[in-house]
Amino acid sequence: MGDSKDGVKGKRVVFVTVGTTCFDALVKVVDSQQVKDELLRRGYSNLLIQMGRGSYLPTKSSGDDGSLAVDYFTFSSSIADHLRSASLVISHAGSGSIFETLQLGKPLIVVVNEDLMDNHQSELAEELAERRHLYCARPPTLCQTIAGMDLKSLVPYSPGDATPVAKLINRYLGFPEE
Amino acid sequence: MEKNTGCPFSNLSPNLGITCFIAFITVILVRVLYVIYWTGKPLNKRSPQQTLSTLIVLGSGGHTAEMINLLLVLQKDRFTPRFYIAAATDNMSLQKARVLENSWADSQSGVERISAEFMQIYRSREVGQSYVTSVWTTLVATAHALWLMIKIRPQVVLCNGPGTCIPLCVIAFIFKVIGIRWSSIFYVESIARVKKLSLSGLLLYKLQIADQFFVQWPQLQRKYPRAHYVGCLIFVNKSCVSESIKAQQADTDIVQTQDQLPNIRT
């Protein structure tokens, strides 16, 4: 499935990424028949899963029989390429994955890992969901989110800017304004 | 108790020993209050040509990405020489900083020597380490941090968490109290913190160690009024933008309207 870069016309890839974490609950739920059916119904043709350190192996499928084509890998140095060729990204709640996807302008569903102890990561996903930059789900609600999502209503994320901080630091240190 | 004060007159008269001890504590306390009073007060005007030695504490993953974004817009000729410190277990962060410094060196075409140093620091406690052994490792880590700080004596400290920056910032604060070096400490809370500060952020804010404290969400600024709200630090670099535009044209699912989100500025 290395040919996902410039896919055949009509090929619409859902890319699932868990980063460097172990998030079997997410891999399991995207591998469930219910979610796969829903993705197929929404017009997606391929499911590519980056499963990280997880141990649950999804079932591969070529998709020849009209079902969703499923493939997976653990890690890759070309995550950015996979993100770029995706039509929908389903990601864990790490800020790196979230912003990389948003900056590429890809529709994003963030799935919060409920098993993490100090789960401050859900804060970021929920806040960005409130601002309609992405959808936020938990593993049990993912299927519902996919069924109900309206990608046209998502607000594009406008990139941030570090110059306000730089300005304040310079002003504090007594450097003249430029 | 008074015998152990280290005061040379303590064996002459116990009263004198106690007086020495109390005087010493008072001087330290007054000095600490003096430092806290001046913490956060802007420095005097200086010429744009002046340079400041800068310590940059790199966190990991997302923290490092945010720090690199800040470094990209800071004036490299003012904040020089630069010292990068990352945890000994984190190989990626220093690598990213090296790539950044090399790209600057290339664009300078050797007119001006870029001076940057890269260092690693021991962590006081690794994930899963037992508390008994962590007493020893904390001591080693503190001694190591002290050694590095004595060598660097930075005028500016830039950090954005997590824990690695705490011992370094505390030492910088102690240097201010003792009078070794008056440094300005800047802390930027991570974008991932929306409603609550991280533990490192909370410590530096509450103990008034950070001179300037930046947050990336308005609701945090309302909760911590001494913080400055600066909006999101992370931005797209140019090559990334063009890529995403190409990708957008190719993909029908992408929302087309490029508007609405108010641009955040202070």
Image (tube, helix red, strand yellow):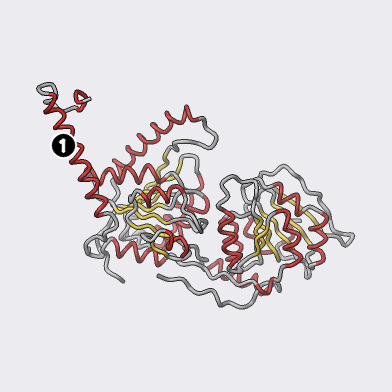
Quadrant position of the N terminus of chain B in the picture: top left
Chain that bears disc 1: B
Which residue is situated farthest in the top direction here?
B11
The residue lying at 67 percent from left, 72 percent from top is B254
Q: For mark 1, does the 10 Å Cα neighbourhood hold few (<14), some (14 to 19), or many (20 or more) residues?
A: few
Residue B70 in which image quadrant: bottom left
Horizontal and vertical percent position of residue A111: 66, 56
Relative placement, left or right, of B193 versus A70 is left
Which residue is situated farthest in the left direction here?
B12
The residue lying at 50 percent from left, 40 percent from top is B89
Q: Mark 1 points at which residue?
A: B23
Answer above or below: position of B8 versus A167. Answer: above
The residue lying at 50 percent from left, 36 percent from top is B126
The residue lying at 19 percent from left, 27 percent from top is B6
Relative placement, left or right, of A106 versus B60 is right
Quadrant position of the C terminus of chain B in the picture: bottom left
Disc 1 is placed on an element classified as: helix
| The one of B248 and B222 positioned closer to us in this rendering | B222
Horizontal and vertical percent position of residue A110: 65, 59
Horizontal and vertical percent position of residue B68: 45, 57
